[in-house]
Image (spheres, rainbow, N blue to C red):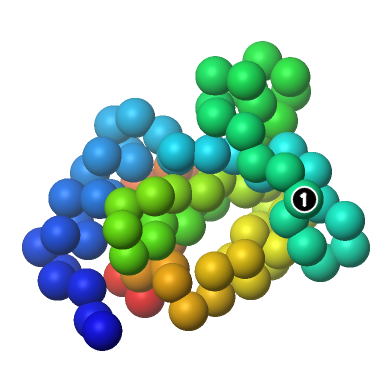
């Protein structure tokens, strides 16, 4: 099922304004082990350079090092990717 592009754009706007739902905080090999709310992850020194947005609006931020693991977590469920540093987004 394809997600409506207008809905994806609303998800992107929400992520641009508020950040991701969760931020990857632990990876084991190629697998995300833990992701915490930004309010917990960022003060602990975790950051994100990319945010993947799922078809239900849930989003996951990851640093460059863990971006691949984050993308694989719901490989068929991501509908967009957003780069906070540039403001650029790609609808997948």
Q: Nearer the viewer, residue 42 or 40?
A: 40
Compared with 72, 48 (above or below) is above
Compared with 65, 90 (above or below) is below
Query: In this figure, what is the number of numbered marks?
Result: 1
The residue lying at 66 percent from left, 15 percent from top is 43
Residue 82 seen by the camera = no
Residue at the left extreme, as displayed: 6
Q: Is residue 88 left or right of residue 1?
A: right
Q: Is residue 62 left or right of residue 90?
A: right
* Residue 75: image location, x then y, percent: 54, 75
User: Which residue is label 1 attached to?
Assistant: 33
Quadrant placement of the N terminus: bottom left
Q: Is residue 8 left or right of residue 57?
A: left
Q: Tag 1: Cα neighbours inside 10 Å, few (<14), some, or many (≥20)?
A: some
Residue 33 seen by the camera = yes
The residue lying at 10 percent from left, 63 percent from top is 6
Compared with 35, 3 (above or below) is below
Residue at the bottom extreme, as displayed: 1
Q: Which secondary structure, mark 1? A: strand
Quadrant placement of the C terminus: bottom left
Q: Nearer the viewer, residue 90 or 31?
A: 31
Q: Quadrant of residue 29 in the image? A: bottom right
* Residue 12: image location, x then y, percent: 27, 50
* Residue 86: image location, x then y, percent: 41, 47
Residue at the right extreme, as displayed: 29
The residue lying at 77 percent from left, 50 percent from top is 33
The residue lying at 64 percent from left, 71 percent from top is 72
Q: Is residue 85 left or right of residue 16?
A: right
Q: Quadrant of residue 38 in the image? A: top right
* Residue 71: image location, x then y, percent: 59, 66
């Amino acid at each position: 099922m394809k997600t409506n592009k207008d809905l994806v754009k609303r998800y992107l706007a929400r992520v641009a304004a508020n950040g991701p739902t969760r931020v990857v905080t632990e990876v084991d090999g190629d697998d995300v082990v833990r992701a915490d709310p930004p309010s917990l992850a960022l003060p602990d020194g975790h950051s994100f350079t990319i945010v993947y947005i799922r078809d239900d609006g849930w989003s996951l931020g990851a640093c460059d090092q863990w971006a691949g693991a984050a993308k694989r977590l719901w490989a068929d469920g991501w509908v967009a990717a957003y780069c906070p540093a540039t403001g650029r987004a790609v609808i997948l």
